[in-house]
Amino acid sequence: METKSRTVTSPGLVSPGPHPGARPGVGARRREPGGRVFACGTRPGTARRKDVGPPSRRPTTRRKEHKGLMQCVLVSSHGRGPRRPKPWTKNLAFGTWNVTSLEGKEPELVREVERYRLEIVGLASTHSLGSGTQLLERGWTLFFSGVPHGERRRAGVGLLIAPQLSRHVLEFSPVNERVVSLRLRAGDRCLTVVSAHGPNGSVEYPTFLETLLGVLEGAPTGDSIVLLGDFNAYVGNDSDTWRGVIGRNGPPDLNSSAVHNEHHVQA
């Protein structure tokens, strides 16, 4: 990890003296509890005014012959080398949005997801006709799934992908107007991202859940699964039973959609 370090002595404060075992003329070492030694001593008289930067929250050190960031290594008294950095990981920002018809709202959609710094957004109620991909402003890609031409548009779902992720898409599966699936590579793993839009009527809900369950179970082994969408369900506030799933500050009522979801989760 690259860090910067800077030593500043405020007026009126006395700098700690050298370690009792320090040799004259050699940079003093500051010993910390636990046996760690910070070998960052400097010879008296070598500091220059132009080498000291302005006060900053980030510690800085700059030498005349070395410009830019400097690496500071913490060495233990047991002679061990620097610790190996942890493997690089990528954090993705997800979101979901019921857009209530997407027709003509694409520019507004891109502006909003960029304002919230999102990278993958599940869209519900797009009222799309057909299915496919659409390139939007500034490189964003919309993957959408709707009804065939000539049928009534009741739902429609989609996934909006940031420009830097578009080239990592492996597979796009437009299931129907209520479920869409996308598989992409992120770092050293693969993600299966699903966007869903549940129906309002209780009659259609079991069929919707069966379709969704089939998509989730069909994800390749080893994939991380991300489920986004609008399930049109009032889930109540029973946080004791559903600890870690729902909060305790929501409305207390349940609707039939929530009951169907609960039965499938328990099964």
Image (cartoon, helix red, strand yellow):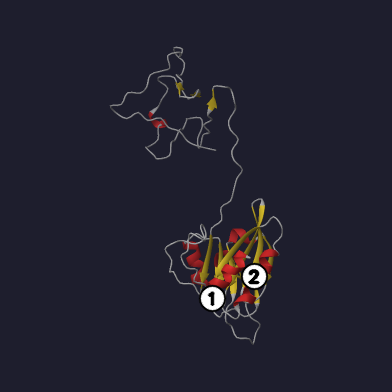
Q: Are marks 2 and 1 in contact (CB under 8 Å)?
A: no
Q: Quadrant of the N terminus?
A: top right
Q: Vertically, is 26 above or below 59?
A: above
Front tag of 2 and 1: 1
Can you name the residue that lies furthest to the left here? 12
Kindly report the distance in space between the C-alpha atoms of the residues bearing marks 2 and 1.
Answer: 17 Å
Q: Quadrant of the C terminus?
A: bottom right
Q: Vertically, is 87 above or below 239?
A: above
Element under disc 1: helix
Residue shown at 60%/86% (left/top)? Answer: 152
Residue 144 lies, in percent from the top left, at 62, 73
Q: Report the amino acid beneath label 2.
A: Leu
In this view of the protein, which residue sits in the foreground, 198 or 29? 198
Residue 226 lies, in percent from the top left, at 60, 61
Q: Report the amino acid beneath label 1.
A: Ser
Residue shown at 67%/73% (left/top)? Answer: 175
Disc 1: which residue = 256
Number of labels in the image equals 2
Asked whether residue 38 is in view, the answer is no
In this view of the protein, which residue sits in the foreground, 221 or 174? 221
Residue 263 lies, in percent from the top left, at 59, 69
Ranked by sequence position, the earlier of labels 2 and 1 is: 2
Q: Vertically, is 82 above or below 164?
A: above
Density class for disc 2 (Cα within 10 Å; few <14, some 14-19, many ≥20) is many
Element under disc 2: helix
Residue 111 lies, in percent from the top left, at 48, 66
Residue 189 as seen in the image, left or right of residue 4: right
Q: Quadrant of residue 84?
A: top right
Disc 2: which residue = 212
Residue 180 as seen in the image, left or right of residue 238: right
Asked whether residue 205 is in view, the answer is yes
